[in-house]
Image (tube, rainbow, N blue to C red):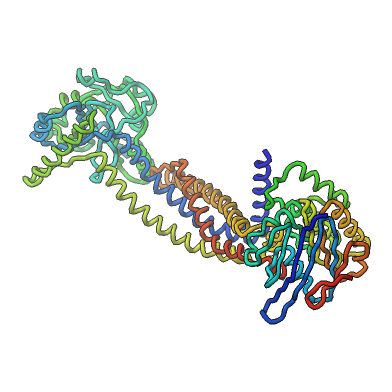
């Protein structure tokens, strides 16, 4: 109990000494604040921007491999025939189809184009981010209804799951559950007679509504912007999900991007299949009909590569700011030591050793650094939240700020570390001051 | 009474040529008061700094509480200053930005003894005895000279040291405050603390134990 009281008394004493000289306190705080604020804000923006994608990719199993078939049936057959043990195969197929074209206001028309994703298993995750922008399936949280089931796939049921943006477009006044979406509707004014597939439309029943994905959110923002502008005809894209079997049955010839997903239970078998497909891709590439093999590692590396470039630039700017503010901190601390020479002498006369004096200046600096860093982190979070609101409401850009423990702790540690490093030399100088000289100091 | 300090043949020079202290002998027992008189610049403060382990000496032998002091390792004796020695400076040497209470408790930050409830009670009791209890939380920079000196005295005696060193403790005080200080020193000595007082004031030394004068770098009994 006594040690606790002693600790709090000492802490209170340090806080008093750290704040007694207002000029020193403010100047030092400003130096640390600026460096930490910019570092923290940059980190929040960078991490939030890429975090969504990283989260999706990290949901992907380590033993999952994705192959872009690019309509190559021969390749599909080869892969199907190859040896795979303890593997779940999921096929996805994405095709652009018009599903609605209707007037909205002032003779303007809205056309809704759908990326129709045929899936054999809606529970498998395929990451959102790719370099070539190929659309893929991404299951999100179910709002109402149900997801596509195994029996839907087996029975080739004509059912779809849509997101809430699609529901708001197609069924603005009512719930989408139990309603029908017609896939293959021709666009207003376009000639569809030559395309036999386009003349045939099929109704799919809506069985479930899921949360908007990142792309749906961005599409919603863009459409809002276009509606507010004077643009004549509007077009937007949505994603809808239906059983692959029913899609294949209804639309026999699809000019599509088909992907095959292989999910292994065992890493050894995964490694073996991965090696096989990579070799096959290389062979086929030499023959002029290569294909891409996408692994979680590759996706992560691609994303990390882009992220690391941004982070390198951010870290360099932060380091430069830290150096500049560090010089300022060191100067202010030296000035403070000079000003407090008589006090140092008094403390030494009453039993303070060299380490006691040095630690006092260091701990005072830590107190100032913690205060300034926490303030900087708090303000950077507020600033980023305001930026988020601005981007969404004014520029219609989808951007979501994510705050986590690391975003708070890392800049705080950086701020404290910088302050401690910069005050070491002045603290050691203070520790070495002779008692007799300091007591005579005017 | 047991001996607290014994100094033999002490010599001190700053420039290697002129010796401020030259063959000085001194001793003091626990509970004893010693007053040292001398002209300005005769080396009184130098002597006090050496006795208080604030400064080194060139030659001689210094025994403090039966420990021989090595002048080359002065920095290692800070613990003695923390627990066994209390200082009262002529210029008070208080930390202006702290309150009366915090100045008095400051030595406890380094003595290893905790700031317990009994310590705080002792602070209150001493402030009361010096008629300063109502100034406990006041900043020292707002006090008068007499009040500051009383705070300095309380700070020196609160940890019950073995030795008090007072350099011109009454130099800036009026008659009534001077008497207060003298009374305080007598009380301290009665509790077994040795007191060494340096002063110009010959009348202060009257009735305060042994009196010495410092001349030519040596101490002489008055």
Q: Position of residue B43 (x, y in %)?
A: 77, 74
Q: Is residue A66 left or right of residue B171?
A: left
Q: Position of residue B141 (x, y in %)?
A: 78, 60
Q: Position of residue A225 (x, y in %)?
A: 38, 44
Q: Between B109 and B16, which is closer to the camera in this rendering?
A: B16
Q: Is residue A292 left or right of residue A372?
A: left
Q: Between B101 and B105, which is closer to the camera in this rendering?
A: B105
Q: Is residue A205 above or below residue A98?
A: above
| Quarter of image, res B45 | bottom right
Q: Is residue B118 above or below residue A169?
A: below
Q: Give the residue drawn at x 51%, y 46%.
A: A382
**Residue A257 in view:** no
Q: Between B222 and A259, which is closer to the camera in this rendering?
A: B222
**Residue B11 in view:** yes
Q: Position of residue B183 (x, y in %)?
A: 90, 57
The quadrant the C terminus of chain A occupies is: bottom right
Q: Give the residue drawn at x 72%, y 73%.
A: B11
Q: Is residue A394 above or below residue A214?
A: below
Q: Is residue B158 left or right of residue A206?
A: right
| Quarter of image, res A314 | bottom left
**How many marks do you count on the picture?**
0
For this orientation, the residue located farthest to the left is A287
């Amino acid at each position: 109990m006594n040690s606790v009281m002693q600790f709090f008394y000492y802490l209170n004493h340090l806080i008093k000494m750290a704040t007694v000289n207002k000029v020193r306190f403010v100047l030092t705080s400003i130096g640390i604040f600026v460096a930490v604020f910019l570092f923290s804000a940059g980190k929040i923006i960078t991490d939030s921007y890429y975090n969504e994608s990283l989260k999706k990719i990290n949901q992907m199993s380590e033993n999952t491999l994705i192959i872009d078939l690019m309509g190559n049936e021969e390749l599909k057959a080869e892969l199907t025939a190859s040896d795979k043990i303890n593997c779940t195969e999921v096929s996805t197929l994405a095709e652009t189809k018009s599903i609605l074209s209707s007037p909205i206001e002032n003779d303007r028309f809205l056309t809704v184009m759908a990326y129709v994703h045929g899936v054999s298993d809606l529970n498998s995750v395929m990451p959102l981010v790719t370099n070539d922008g190929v659309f893929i399936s991404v299951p999100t949280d179910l709002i109402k209804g149900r997801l596509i089931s195994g029996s839907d796939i087996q029975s080739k049921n004509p059912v779809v799951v849509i997101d809430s943006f699609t529901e708001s477009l197609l069924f603005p006044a009512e719930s989408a559950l139990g309603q029908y979406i017609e896939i293959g509707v021709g666009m207003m004014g376009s000639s569809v007679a030559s395309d036999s597939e386009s003349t045939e439309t099929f109704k799919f029943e809506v069985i479930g509504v899921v949360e908007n994905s990142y792309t749906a959110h961005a599409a919603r923002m863009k459409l809002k912007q276009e509606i507010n502008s004077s643009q004549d005809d509007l077009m937007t894209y949505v994603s809808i999900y239906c059983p692959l079997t029913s899609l294949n049955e209804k639309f026999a010839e699809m000019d599509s991007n088909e992907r095959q997903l292989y999910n292994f239970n065992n890493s050894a078998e995964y490694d073996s299949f991965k090696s096989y497909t990579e070799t096959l891709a290389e062979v086929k590439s030499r023959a002029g009909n290569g294909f891409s093999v996408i692994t979680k590692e590759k996706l992560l590396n691609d994303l990390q590569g882009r992220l690391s470039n941004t982070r390198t630039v951010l870290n360099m700017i932060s380091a430069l700011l830290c150096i500049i503010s560090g010089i300022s901190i060191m100067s202010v601390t030296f000035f403070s030591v000079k000003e407090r020479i008589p006090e140092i002498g008094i403390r030494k006369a009453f039993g303070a050793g060299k380490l006691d004096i040095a630690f006092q200046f260091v701990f005072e600096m830590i107190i100032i650094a913690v205060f300034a860093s926490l303030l900087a982190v708090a303000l950077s979070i507020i600033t980023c939240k305001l930026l988020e609101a601005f981007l969404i409401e004014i520029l219609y850009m989808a951007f979501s700020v994510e705050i986590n423990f690391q975003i708070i702790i890392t800049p705080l540690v950086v701020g404290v570390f910088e302050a401690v490093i910069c005050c070491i030399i002045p603290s050691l100088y203070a520790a070495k001051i002779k008692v007799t000289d300091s007591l005579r100091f005017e | 009474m047991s001996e607290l300090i014994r100094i033999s043949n002490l010599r001190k020079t700053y420039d290697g040529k002129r010796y401020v202290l030259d063959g000085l002998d001194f001793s003091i027992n626990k509970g004893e008061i010693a007053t040292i008189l001398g002209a300005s610049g005769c080396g009184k403060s130098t002597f006090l700094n050496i006795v208080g382990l604030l400064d080194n000496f060139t030659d001689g032998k210094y025994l403090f509480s039966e420990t021989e002091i090595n002048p080359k390792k002065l920095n290692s004796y800070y613990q003695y200053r923390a627990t066994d020695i209390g200082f009262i400076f002529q210029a008070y040497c208080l930390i202006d930005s702290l309150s009366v209470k915090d100045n008095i408790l400051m030595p406890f930050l380094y003595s290893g003894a905790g700031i317990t409830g009994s310590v705080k009670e002792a602070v209150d009791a001493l402030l009361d005895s010096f008629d300063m209890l109502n100034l406990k939380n006041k900043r020292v920079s707002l006090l008068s000279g007499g009040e500051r000196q009383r705070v300095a005295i309380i700070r020196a005696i609160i940890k019950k040291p073995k030795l008090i060193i007072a350099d011109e403790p009454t130099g800036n005080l009026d008659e009534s405050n001077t008497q207060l200080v003298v009374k305080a020193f007598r009380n301290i000595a009665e509790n077994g603390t040795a007191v060494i007082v340096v002063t110009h004031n010959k009348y202060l030394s009257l009735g305060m134990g042994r009196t010495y004068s410092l001349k030519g770098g040596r101490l002489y009994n008055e």
